[in-house]
Image (cartoon, grey):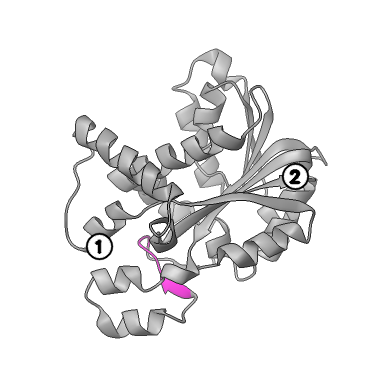
Amino acid sequence: MPEDAWAGLADKFADEAYASVKGYVRTHVMHQHLLAHLPPPPAAVLDVGGGAGHQSLPLALAGYEVTILDSSPAMLEKARHRLEGLPEVDRERVRLVEGAGQDAEIAVDGRRFAVALCHGVLGYLDDPEPVVDQLCRCTAPGGIVSIMTGNARAAAVRPALERRWEDALASFDARTEVGVLGVQGRADTVDELTELLEQRGVAGLAWYGVWLFVDWLEFGGTALEPGDEAELAAIAAVELEASRRDPYRQLSRVFHLVGRKG
C-alpha cells in the first residue's frame, strides 16, 4: 500500500462523487439527521476520517466548531482548498489534523468533543472496533456519536440491479464487495454497531437509511442530472423521508447510526 492510500482517489472521491446526485443526497440527508440530534452551536465536532469535509464544513457554516481528522494528506489538502471558499469567520472555526482514526484520542491531545462523526470510514477497515472505541473515548459525557457505513443486510441490492445474478445470490451472506471507487469495502449491521457502542457507554438513539431510490436508479442504468436544481431538491426530499421509514431504510445500502454517551 502507498504511504497515502487515498492520494490516487482524492479527486474521484472529493470532486466527482460529491458533485453527483448521490453525493448531494448523502450530504443533505445526513445533515438533516444530524441537526435533529446535535446540541446547538458552537458545540465542538470531531469528524474522524472527515476527508474533504463535505459533511462537517456545513456544520461549521451553521456555527459549530469543527476538527477534521484524516490520515490522508491528499484528502486534507482537498479540505484545505474547500476551506478557502468559506468566509473567514467560518474558516476560523475549522481545524485540520492529520492522524489515523485508530489513534484519534492521541491526535487530538485527549480532548473531548460534544459530537464525534465517522462517516464512510468503517467499511474500509477489517475490524471496526478500534475506531468505534476511539470515537467513544473522544466524546464527552452526554455527547453524540454518529456513524455511517455499509448495510450488510442490503448487500444484494447493487449486484441485482446491475443484473449480476450470481453475485447477487452470493451477496445475501457476504460482507465485502468492490465499491464504486474500485476499492474493497466491508459492511456492518445496525445491531452489531449498536452493541459496540453500548459496550462503551453510548446508547443508540436512532438509525436511518441514506441512499435508496438514487441507488436503484443509478445501478439500473438511469442517469441523474445534478444540474437540475428543482429535481435535485425533490429527490433529496423523497430520500430524506425514505431514510426515516421502514421498510425503506432497511433497503438502503448505507445506514446512519446515532448514539448518545451516558
Q: Is residue 170 left or right of residue 97?
A: left
Whether the magenta-drawn stretch holds residue 27 is answered as: no
Question: Which residues are the magenta region?
Answer: 176-181
Q: Residues within 10 Å of mark 2 (few under 14, many from 20)?
A: some
**Which secondary structure, mark 1?**
helix
Would residue 78 be seen by someone viewing this image from the given angle? no
- Please report whichever mark, 1 or 2, sits nearer to the chain's N-terminal start: 2
Residue located at (58% from left, 49% from top): 206
Left or right, 142 with respect to 79, comes to: right
Q: Quadrant of the C terminus?
A: top right
Q: Determine the residue positioned at 33% across, 79% down.
A: 168
Q: Residue at x 43, y 66 (%)?
A: 183
Considering only vertical position in the picture, is 255 above or below 22? below
Is residue 48 shown above or below 62?
Answer: below
- Disc 2 residue type (three-letter): Ala
Q: Which residue is mark 2?
A: 107
Picture layout, residue 163 above or below residue 200: below
Residue pictured at 37% horizontal, 52% vertical: 211
In this view, 203 is above or below 69: below
Residue 146 visible in rendering: yes
Question: Residue 219's mark?
Answer: 1
Is residue 53 left or right of 213 when viewed as pictured?
Answer: right
Where is residue 157, by image quadrant? bottom left
Q: Which quadrant would residue 116 be assigned to in this image?
A: top right
Report crowding for label 1: few under 14, some 14 to 19, many 20 or more residues within 10 A (C-alpha).
Answer: some
Please provide percent x and percent y for residue 104: 73, 49
Can you tell which of label 1 and label 2 is closer to the viewer?
1
Q: Position of residue 32 (x, y in %)?
A: 47, 35
Residue 51, given in percent of the width and then of the height, sits at: 52, 44
Residue nearest the viewer, comparing 229 with 77? 229
